Amino acid sequence: MSRTLPRIVNAVAPIRVCDVGGWTDTWFARHGAVFNIAVYPYVEVQVRVEDHAEGEERVTIAAENFGDTYAINPDRVIYDKHPLIEAAIDVMRLPSTMALRINIFSDAPPGASTGTSAAVSVALIGALDSLVGGDLGPHEVAGLAHFIETKKLGLQCGIQDQLASAYGGINYIDMHEFPSSTVTPIRIPNPVWWELEHRLTVIYIGRPHSSSALHMKVIEGLGSGAHADARLERLRRLAAAARNAVCAGDFPALGRVMDENTDIQRALHRDLVCPKMEEIIAVAREFDALGVKVNGAGGDGGSLTILTGGEMSKKRAMLRTLADLSFTSLPMYLSRQGLRVW
């Protein structure tokens, strides 16, 4: 029997920054609200699909950022090299008639606290779903990606990263009862969108972090009454304040919200805003930044989102100063779209 020509499936999903209200999208918060912004660089997944022939590997994974290429048996998946990728393949139940070579790549560094792992799951699920009918909507893709991290791998994470990758754009996420949520896209005029994109910058401190480990520290500190903690309630309110500021094009107000959110992160646990992050925040202040948000869970690695004052010469001078201190500016563009598969 002749074999059909290979088919190529591509999928991309954005990462997330400036997650105001993060920590309230967790099981221990019970209910919450998060404002976040989906951005490029996105995660790229490319799947080469061929007919499976006897004696050939059914699934080969190329984790390009790590230089790893290896085969797995989709009928007996072992989570030992890249568990997030392996678990997604395990959950999707691929047809035995297909042979797949899956290449995964991201320009965003791993552990940058920008939801890169969620974007990997979302893009991979989207690509594999297209091979088995393509019936999953963005909320379903995000839910399955969250299930993989929390239930299949036993990691601690909220729901916002997966939703940001699946939906794209600027969103207000209302988690009325964990993990159920409603996503409301924030529509703003192009000039406000462009100005927000122009002012924002993301700074990577140069080393990754483990968000699941940080979650455990915060959970321990909050205790059994976490859902009613005043700090989490303040974060819930800040998500709405960030939404309102962006809708109004009020950048000083957004900056104040970002700063207050970072203050609450400090109050949640002393390890969430490390000395390197404080150094970056101090430099941002020198150049009249309006606000700084520690991305994601924070910790001794990861990144920060800086909202600059709008004077681009000062922004460039700030970036040069941070580069001299060995901090990295991550190229970033706001993503109007979420998961795309073709």
Image (cartoon, rainbow, N blue to C red):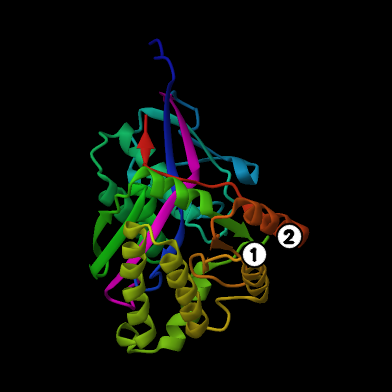
Which mark, residue 287?
1
> Visible in this render: residue 54?
yes
Query: Residue sitting at 34 percent across and 78 percent down?
Result: 28
Q: Nearer the viewer, residue 287 or 128?
A: 287
Q: Which residue is mark 2?
A: 321
Measured as percent of width and height from the top left, residue 147 is found at: 34, 59
Q: Nearer the viewer, residue 136 or 243?
A: 243
Instruction: Tell me which amino acid carries mark 1.
Output: Phe
Q: Quadrant of the N terminus?
A: top left
Which mark, residue 86?
none
Q: Is residue 177 left or right of residue 271?
A: left
Q: Quadrant of the C terminus?
A: top left
Q: Nearer the viewer, residue 340 or 204?
A: 204
Rounded to the nearest angstrom, the CA distance separating label 1 from label 2 is 10 Å
Asked if the residue at tag 2 contacts the one at tag 1, i.e. Cβ–Cβ closer than 8 Å, the answer is: yes
The residue range painted magenta reads: 26-52
Measured as percent of width and height from the top left, residue 39 is found at: 46, 48
